[in-house]
Amino acid sequence: MQIKDVLLAPGNGAFFYDDQAAIRSGATQDGFIYVGTPTTPGFDRIRIPASSLSVGLVLTDETVVWGDMMNVQYSGAGGRGLVFDTNQISDLTSRAVVPRLLDVDATQFRDSCTNAFQLVEHRRLPLAIEYGVSQALLRAAAHLHRKTMAEIICSEFGLQLPTSRVPIYCQSGDSREINVDKMVLKAVDVLPHGLINSRQKFGIDGQAFMEFVKWVATRTRQIGRPGYHPVLHFDVYGWIGQEIGLEPQSIADFICKVADTVPDFTLNIESPADFGSTQAQIENYAKIVSILDNRGSNARLVVDERCNTLEDIRLFAEAKATHLVQIKTPDVGSIADTARAVLLCKKNKVGAYVGGSCTETDLSAQASVHVSVATQADMMLAKPGMGVDEAFSIVGNEQSRLLAMLDRRRSQAINVG
């Protein structure tokens, strides 16, 4: 067997876990913290530092390959798992997963994941465990085959080696104006997220949000290089539905109104409303998509909440209940399922956005790049953290290095042929 030992190392995520329900209910900010009583189980404060757990696979040649486990920023919201508990995850990994890892054929990535992630007491493992362990298994297969992680994905899913870069999407956090300037100066493909997560940021009838959208469009023209024309993407955390109601027609009308203020841009609106369940979300998002399509709007609906697992993604894609799926990698679980999710979206002619969370790490971000490029996703998130510079360099540089290696691999193949 290629794995002879397993190491576990507690670590930090790159941002914080936030109680979304408390923030939506009006918790006020005092500096960087939120003041008030948490309402989501697992939170002892509204904002707590993100924790992570690294899993290291010690291979027979003494190489150690790593993957990182964590949950997303808004844990416990929208059907997601509870806040990450390092001690509980470490204990379960040691008891249930480590013995399986010592018995897998690490050269076979998908089979290794299947064997490692079998049910425990008739229940699926926490998705954070799947996510971190699958990263390590992907790195192990890449090391043993002397290939990149992207090549392993291509080989196991029957894909051609990619030649094109995947557009990168940056998120601003609360430092919105400064970070928009950074994104524009760095010619980011998709921007700025905007963190429209409160009534103050959305405004009465959405006026504050619309003004921000117009400002972003204007700013790209003012300081962007000639010919720079990004996609504008805003995450509104359900505030359209909260502020103007949950009628699909009204929500579509509002989205079109926003799109009309920036007619020269493709406009992505993420999470316009939360209808309370996956099925209700599918039914109502499908109506909104249909209205936008019939109007020929330049706006695209992006689903996040209530679309977490691979099965959720399948349901949304097959129902055409979104234009673009955020494949939120820690919520999907195994990174093999992220690859499956992209391919499933492509099969159903729905956009695939490999996202994730600001709470992730450099290792999980780099692994996500390889899966995104291998499957040729429509866009991928610059992560981890809420700063632009670090996340954009981690994801952008990893993609650039990967494409250079793949170009060399193709040249070698041609010369041999």
Image (cartoon, rainbow, N blue to C red):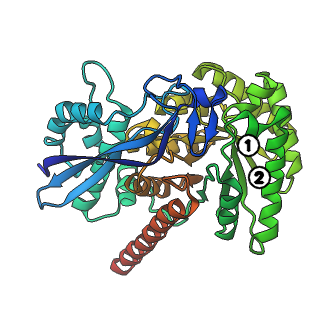
- Give the image location of residue 39, x and y in percent: 53, 22
* Residue type pointed to by label 1: Arg
Report how far apart the C-alphas of labels 2 and 1 lie in the structure: 8 Å
62, 292: nearer the viewer: 62
Figure label count: 2
Quadrant hosting residue 145: bottom left
- Give the image location of residue 247, x and y in percent: 79, 21
Q: In this view, does 331 lie to the left or right of 102?
A: right
Name the residue that disc number 1 marks.
300
Quadrant hosting residue 141: bottom left
Disc sitting over residue 266 in the figure: 2
Q: Say which element carries label 1.
A: strand
Quadrant hosting residue 224: bottom right
* Residue type pointed to by label 2: Thr
250, 370: nearer the viewer: 250
**Residue 296 in view, yes or no:** no
- Give the image location of residue 369, x and y in percent: 46, 57
Q: In this view, does 104 lie to the left or right of 239?
A: left
The quarter of the rendered structure image containing the C terminus is bottom left
410, 360: nearer the viewer: 360
Q: In this view, does 178 lie to the left or right of 412?
A: right
Q: Say which element carries label 2.
A: loop
Disc sitting over residue 263 in the figure: none
Q: In this view, does 296 lie above or below 280?
A: below
Residue occupying the point 45% across, 59% down: 160
